[in-house]
Amino acid sequence: PEHGTTLYDRTFNESNFTVTRLLHYFGVTESDALGDWCGWHNDNSTITGLVPAMWLEEDSGRQVDPIPGAGLFVEGRKGETIPVASPKDCLGFQIGEASQILTGGVVQAT
């Protein structure tokens, strides 16, 4: 459809640049007063690849079960809080605000 995405199309089809960054969230202790740690926000990039979380014991490096209430959460369309748990062999994608801006709102940030 003709929805005025020239800038968006050129960004992905003609750009010679790939910008990536790896984010790692460091462990916290029960005494850390983080509240809503990162807080609700829209991702600011165009598209973000999300790998499944891996929880490790700090001293041994042994994989352990996640701490209840920790991890990635999203807000559903009705305002509900939904935990995101990707299967170990999957990769998820999140649409960022840059995509929303570049498409004039045709694509909504998640």
Image (cartoon, grey):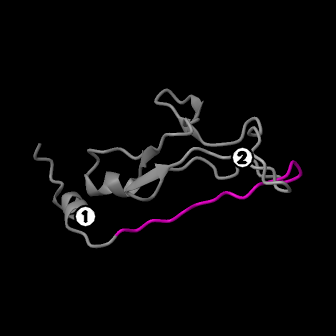
Q: Nearer the viewer, residue 72 or 33?
A: 72
Dot 1 and dot 2 residues touching (CB under 8 Å): no
Residue 26 at x, y percent in the picture: 72, 58
Q: Is residue 26 left or right of residue 24?
A: right
Q: Amino acid at mark 1?
A: Thr
Which residue appears farthest toward the bottom when viewing the image? 16
Which residue appears farthest toward the right when viewing the image? 31
Judging from the image, what secondary structure is the residue with disc 1 in? helix
Q: Quadrant of residue 5?
A: bottom left
Q: How many marks?
A: 2
Mark 2 neighbour class, 10 Å CA radius: few under 14, some 14 to 19, many 20 or more: some
Which numbered mark, 1 or 2, is in the foreground of this view?
2
The kind of secondary structure the magenta stretch mainly shows is loop
Residue plotted at (25% across, 52% down) = 103
Residue plotted at (56% across, 28% down) = 80
Q: Earlier in the sequence, mark 1 or mark 2?
A: 1
Q: Amino acid at mark 2?
A: Trp
Q: Is residue 10 left or right of residue 38?
A: left
Magenta span includes 43? no
Judging from the image, what secondary structure is the residue with disc 2 in? loop
Identify the residue position indicated by label 2 in the image. 55
Residue 55 at x, y percent in the picture: 72, 46
Q: Is residue 87 left or right of residue 59?
A: left
Quadrant holding the N terminus? top left
Residue 41 at x, y percent in the picture: 54, 50
The magenta stretch is 18-32
Q: Is residue 18 above or below residue 4?
A: below
Identify the residue position indicated by label 1 in the image. 11
